[in-house]
């Protein structure tokens, strides 16, 4: 075989997809080459995701700048198109629970941010209609005050649903703008609290909450081709012909991330660690016991019908929001510098509860942490580096405790913890989690969400084949994790 023929054979063995991955603080468009022996990511665009607080007549509301995100996505897709005009597919994932309302084909205002305090009223309304224990038996979801059913019930009370024809979760909204097709991808829809045990919309619960059933889009599974690019976009973006298909992926970002965790699901726990730390195990069936509800564990949909049995821990939000506060005060600090200073400090003997609801809202988290300690007659760390260290150790303790609870409630004999996402870069957090859990931690890949997104697309368009275990084996061959033993020693 000549050198040219060899290159042609290798090129024919793989193809390209674009993974749009929207996180709660930033977004990215990734250009992925995927094949049976190929898995490569190139960043085409990265952009901030900054919420906007606006006056609404009787107070302020916190919203996502989703139209700004869409503009950045199109710019990133343009970059991909110039490099890969024959792109096979585009897939979109994002954070869960938030949605846009569509009326007469148009977005009726920027979507609310899940940290907006209007959700408190939603909890009152829903729990007055349906007992929380019954909600858990129906949907199996961890109680979080911003779950979609609470938000939708507030919108119903305010009349916001009257002018709407649909509500579309954020990834489905982006897909609608790309294709003109309305759908609800099932893994993300499972976070609304409004799916029944069979994976269909729970018509009985929807009716009891007084929500209009016709606002719910048809459900599709990850791996479904949901449409082609609208003609106007196909002519604007320099793709060949009509352009790529848009494929539904595990559109809840954690669902995509779990696809790319190189784990033996029968013996491992995962932590998808970004703004939130999603800590859990993968199961075949939901756990709906009263003990599970009391522990506030959730049963969310995974790709290929798997169950993501997990608990939300506050995550790296505690670091990023603290850093923003120090910078607002005029301190010239960076996270990298603070992590270096924190590593030189002794391990704190007193920790705070990283899951305390006071840490959910934006604002002055360092002062709230100090208040938590003061209320218990303890001294909080005085320096930013000290606060960073106690945040790391408190998060690690929360992660370790949650892994133990997940194992006990599910029956999975956890022998290894996998950390993926941005937290995999944080060596101090990974080592502290290993030390506090007594289990080895395997860190990486960092871009697990984009990889899982790309792999589901690639399988749907025929670039790869196999079950989740086959996809994970491909990840393991190309992205070797860093191993942290519970001894204070890092093993590469």
Image (cartoon, grey):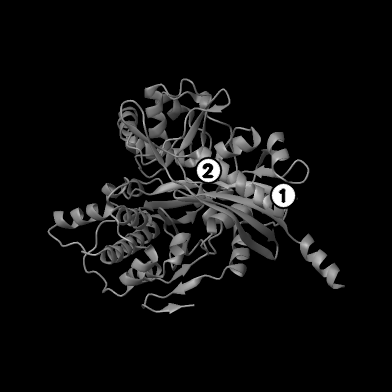
Q: Residue at point 42% right, 72% down? A: 440
Q: Residue at point 58% right, 45% down? A: 73
Q: Are marks 1 and 2 in contact (CB under 8 Å)?
A: no
Helix, strand or loop at label 1? It is loop
Q: Residue at point 60% right, 35% down? A: 176
State the image coordinates of residue 7 (x, y, percent, origin top left).
80, 67
Residue 27 appears left or right of 380: right
Q: Which mark is residue 88?
A: 1
Dot 1, how many residues are within 10 Å of its Cα: few (below 14), some (14-19), or many (20+)?
many
Q: Residue at point 52% right, 26% down? A: 215
State which tag comes first along the sequence, 1 or 2: 2
Residue sitting farthest toward the left: 377
User: Residue 351's image quarter?
Assistant: bottom left
Q: Nearer the viewer, residue 259 or 107?
A: 107
Residue under label 2:
69
Q: Does the image show residue 289?
A: yes
Helix, strand or loop at label 2? It is helix
Q: Quadrant of the N terminus?
A: bottom right
Q: Does the image show residue 270?
A: no
State the image coordinates of residue 30 (x, y, percent, origin top left).
60, 54
Residue 398 appears left or right of 232: left
Eyeballing the image, is 170 above or below 311?
above
State the image coordinates of residue 463 (x, y, percent, origin top left).
72, 55
User: Residue 402's image quarter?
Assistant: bottom left
Residue sitting farthest toward the right: 1
Dot 2, how many residues are within 10 Å of its Cα: few (below 14), some (14-19), or many (20+)?
many
């Amino acid at each position: 075989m000549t050198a040219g023929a060899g290159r042609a054979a290798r090129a024919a063995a793989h193809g390209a997809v674009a993974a749009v991955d929207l996180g709660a603080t930033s977004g990215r468009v990734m250009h992925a080459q995927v094949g049976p022996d190929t898995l490569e990511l190139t960043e085409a665009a990265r952009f901030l995701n900054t919420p906007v607080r606006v006056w609404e007549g009787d107070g302020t509301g916190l919203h996502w700048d989703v139209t700004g995100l869409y503009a950045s996505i199109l710019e990133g897709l343009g970059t991909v198109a110039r490099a890969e005009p024959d792109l096979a597919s585009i897939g979109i994932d994002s954070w869960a629970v938030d949605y846009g309302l569509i009326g007469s084909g148009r977005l009726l205002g920027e979507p609310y941010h899940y940290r907006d305090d209007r959700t408190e009223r939603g909890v009152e309304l829903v729990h007055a209609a349906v007992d929380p224990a019954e909600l858990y038996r129906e949907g199996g979801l961890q109680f979080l005050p911003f779950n979609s059913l609470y938000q939708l019930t507030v919108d119903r009370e305010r009349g916001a649903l009257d002018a709407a024809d649909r509500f579309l979760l954020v990834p489905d909204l982006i897909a609608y703008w790309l294709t003109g097709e309305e759908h609800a991808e099932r893994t993300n829809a499972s976070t609304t609290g409004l799916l029944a045990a069979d994976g269909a919309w729970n018509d009985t619960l929807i009716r009891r909450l007084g929500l209009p059933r016709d606002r719910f889009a048809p459900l599709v599974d990850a791996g479904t081709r949901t449409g082609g690019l609208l003609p106007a976009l196909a002519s604007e973006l320099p793709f060949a012909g009509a352009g790529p298909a848009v494929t539904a992926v595990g559109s809840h970002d954690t669902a995509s991330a779990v696809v790319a965790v190189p784990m033996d699901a029968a013996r491992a726990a995962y932590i998808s660690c970004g703004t939130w730390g999603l800590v859990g195990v993968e199961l075949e069936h939901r756990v709906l016991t009263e003990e599970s509800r009391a522990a506030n564990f959730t049963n969310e949909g995974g790709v290929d019908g798997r169950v993501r049995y997990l608990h939300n821990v506050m995550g790296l939000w505690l670091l990023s929001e603290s850093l923003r506060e120090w910078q607002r005060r005029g301190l010239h600090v960076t996270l990298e510098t603070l992590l270096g200073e924190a590593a030189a400090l002794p391990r704190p003997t007193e920790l705070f509860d990283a899951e305390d609801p006071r840490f959910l809202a934006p604002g002055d988290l360092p002062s709230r942490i100090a208040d938590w300690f003061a209320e218990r007659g303890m001294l909080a760390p005085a320096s930013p580096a000290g606060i960073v260290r106690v945040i790391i150790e408190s998060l690690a303790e929360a992660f370790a405790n949650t892994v133990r609870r997940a194992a006990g409630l599910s029956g999975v004999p956890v022998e290894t913890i996998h950390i993926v996402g941005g937290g995999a870069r944080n060596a101090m957090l990974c080592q502290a989690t290993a030390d506090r859990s007594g289990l080895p931690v395997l860190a990486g890949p960092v871009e697990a969400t984009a990889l899982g997104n790309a792999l589901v697309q690639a399988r749907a368009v025929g670039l790869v084949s196999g079950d989740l275990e086959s996809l994970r084996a491909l990840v393991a061959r190309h992205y070797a994790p860093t191993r942290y033993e519970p001894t204070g020693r890092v093993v590469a």
